[in-house]
Image (tube, rainbow, N blue to C red):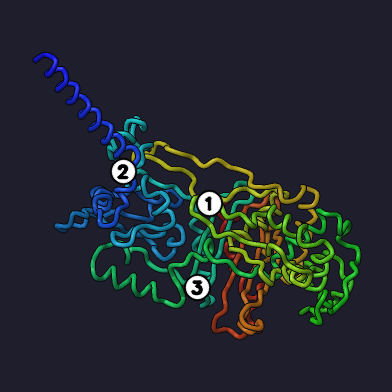
């Protein structure tokens, strides 16, 4: 009898241990898979059972979490202040379609399910106990964001703006137009479905974040990278000495002859070529240096990095992997298969402005609990040393000349030092489409030691005549407005 009882007790103990082991396995290893299983509404119900945390701009909430006051088990909704203005920053949080951008990346914190929100994070992670939702404080400067949005809207064209603090990498403005109101996607009703269908079918793609997720041929703004490579490699030792550059330039291994939009480019100095945007000088320099040198320099500014996050993922900007010589020539003037996001080109301007040091860009200043205590603060981090300080200072002077005496005059700001570079990137079959207008720049107050802002603006093709689409004509005034807003706020 005793032996039988012992065997039964041992068997029950094994069953208990198996049950505990299975429960532990499910909680530790399978919970996430079950959470994301199709048809499981529990995570969605939990996410909207309490008020969602806020995304903050300059300490002010640009999101809300109103009670739905309905019988739905999704008790709280989502609302947005100035939704179209901040949509490229916040993204959307939808009861039907999930979340994007900061709403998506920081969803656990905003929903209150992040273990770091609890007093004892390890215990919170094990028990999966929900805490009051946290908040996300962004680096966005409202005046810069508003200036960028208004400037792009005034053109009537699609486009994007990215502005950075060169010394820290903090993103001061992030705008994409046309935009949309993420509040239209927040609910779970017929109107939400209709709004999603309309936005998804819109040929202008308003939900596309062009500042982070669209790459464009950077055109002549990429000549800053080529100039950096020429000075850093020693191919050009004196930016004021004439180069050996024919006009037009016969592309190697080709019958094509590359020309210029301006005069004076034959044997022009590097300084003049950058200020006046001579295609021939930079195309020949790219061929003389070779694709490997050009690729290394582009990479030093942030190109060819598929893992860049701010913490939102950023589409990789690329310099062609294996171009031949004529392709290298075109790639060196920002054409062929060279592609860049507006954020990447803002990083180029910021790297030059910051004496050659490219800081890792970031959009989130800190994460906080509901009581304001800090969960996480973003550290300033160097992404790469693009060029040495002496080379950077030469580039600064050349970019400043491009604004004072060259094609970037519309970016000039009274009482400030501005360095810039215009760009007009061709695209479309046989380059017949209306080109993209670019301008990259940095600015500092006359008495300041370091620049306060670096910016990149791209304006896509639209209803304007081709002759009116130029970096200096369309993009530079927008950049000027953004930089002026930052300088006024500092």
User: Is disc 3 placed on a helix, strand or loop?
Assistant: helix
Residue closest to the far top: 2
User: Is disc 1 placed on a helix, strand or loop?
Assistant: loop
Closer mark to the observer between disc 2 and disc 3? 2
Does 134 sit above or below residue 282? above
Residue 5 in picture, x, y percent from top left: 12, 18
Q: Are marks 1 and 2 in contact (CB under 8 Å)?
A: no
Does 429 sit above or below residue 121? below
Residue 406 in picture, x, y percent from top left: 76, 70
User: Is disc 2 placed on a helix, strand or loop?
Assistant: helix
* Label 3 sits on residue: 153
Cα gap from disc 2 to disc 3, whole angstroms: 46 Å
Q: Which is nearer the eye, 205 or 291?
A: 291
Query: Which of the 4 image quarters holds residue 202?
Result: bottom left
Q: Earlier in the sequence, mark 3 or mark 1?
A: 3
Q: Which is nearer the eye, 28 or 119?
A: 28
Give the residue displayed 89% in from the left and 67% down from the top. 243
Q: Earlier in the sequence, mark 2 or mark 3?
A: 2
Residue 263 in picture, x, y percent from top left: 83, 79
* Label 2 sits on residue: 31
Does 390 sit above or below residue 426? above
Q: Which label sits on residue 309?
A: 1
Residue closest to the far left: 1
Give the residue displayed 14% in from the left and 15% down from the top. 3
In the picture provided, is 236 more to the left or to the right than 62?
A: right
Q: Which label sits on residue 428?
A: none
């Amino acid at each position: 009898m005793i032996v039988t009882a012992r065997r039964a007790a041992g068997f029950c103990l094994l069953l208990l241990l198996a049950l505990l082991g299975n429960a532990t396995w499910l909680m530790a290893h399978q919970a996430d898979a079950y959470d994301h299983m199709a048809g499981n509404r529990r995570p969605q119900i939990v996410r909207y059972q309490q008020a969602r945390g806020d995304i903050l701009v300059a300490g002010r909430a640009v999101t809300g979490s109103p009670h739905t006051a309905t019988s739905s088990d999704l008790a709280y909704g989502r609302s947005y202040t100035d939704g179209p203005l901040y949509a490229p920053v916040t993204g959307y949080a939808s009861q039907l379609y999930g979340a994007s951008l900061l709403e998506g990346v920081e969803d656990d914190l905003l929903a209150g399910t992040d273990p770091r929100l609890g007093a004892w994070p390890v215990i919170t992670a094990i028990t999966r106990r929900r805490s009051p939702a946290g908040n996300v404080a962004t680096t966005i400067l409202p005046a810069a964001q508003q200036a960028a949005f208004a400037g792009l809207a005034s053109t009537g064209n699609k486009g994007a703006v990215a502005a950075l603090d060169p010394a820290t990498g903090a993103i001061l403005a992030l705008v994409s137009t046309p935009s949309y109101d993420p509040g239209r996607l927040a609910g779970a009703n017929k109107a939400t479905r209709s709004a999603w269908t309309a936005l998804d079918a819109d040929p202008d793609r308003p939900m596309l974040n062009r500042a982070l997720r669209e790459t464009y041929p950077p055109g002549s703004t990429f000549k800053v990278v080529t100039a950096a490579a020429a000075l850093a490699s020693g191919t050009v030792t004196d930016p004021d000495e004439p180069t050996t550059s024919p006009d037009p330039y016969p592309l190697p291994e080709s019958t094509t002859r590359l020309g210029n939009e301006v005069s004076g480019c034959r044997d022009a100095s590097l300084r003049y070529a950058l200020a006046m945007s001579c295609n021939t000088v930079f195309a020949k320099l790219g061929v003389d240096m070779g694709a490997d040198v050009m690729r290394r320099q582009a990479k030093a500014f942030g190109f060819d990095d598929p893992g860049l996050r701010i913490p939102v993922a950023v589409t990789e900007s690329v310099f062609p992997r294996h171009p031949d010589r004529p392709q290298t020539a075109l790639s060196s003037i920002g054409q062929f298969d060279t592609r860049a996001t507006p954020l990447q080109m803002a990083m180029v301007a910021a790297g030059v402005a910051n004496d050659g040091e490219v800081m890792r860009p970031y959009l989130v200043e800190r994460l906080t609990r509901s009581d304001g205590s800090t969960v996480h603060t973003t550290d300033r981090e160097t992404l790469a040393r693009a060029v040495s300080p002496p080379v950077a200072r030469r580039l600064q002077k050349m970019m400043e000349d491009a604004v004072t005496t060259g094609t970037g005059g519309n970016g000039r700001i009274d009482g400030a030092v501005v360095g810039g570079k215009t760009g007009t990137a061709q695209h479309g079959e046989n380059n017949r489409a209306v080109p993209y207008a670019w301008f990259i720049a940095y600015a500092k107050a006359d008495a300041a030691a370091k620049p306060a802002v670096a910016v990149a603006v791209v304006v896509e093709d639209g209803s304007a005549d081709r002759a009116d689409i130029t970096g200096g004509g369309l993009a530079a005034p927008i950049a000027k407005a953004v930089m002026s807003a930052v300088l006024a706020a500092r």
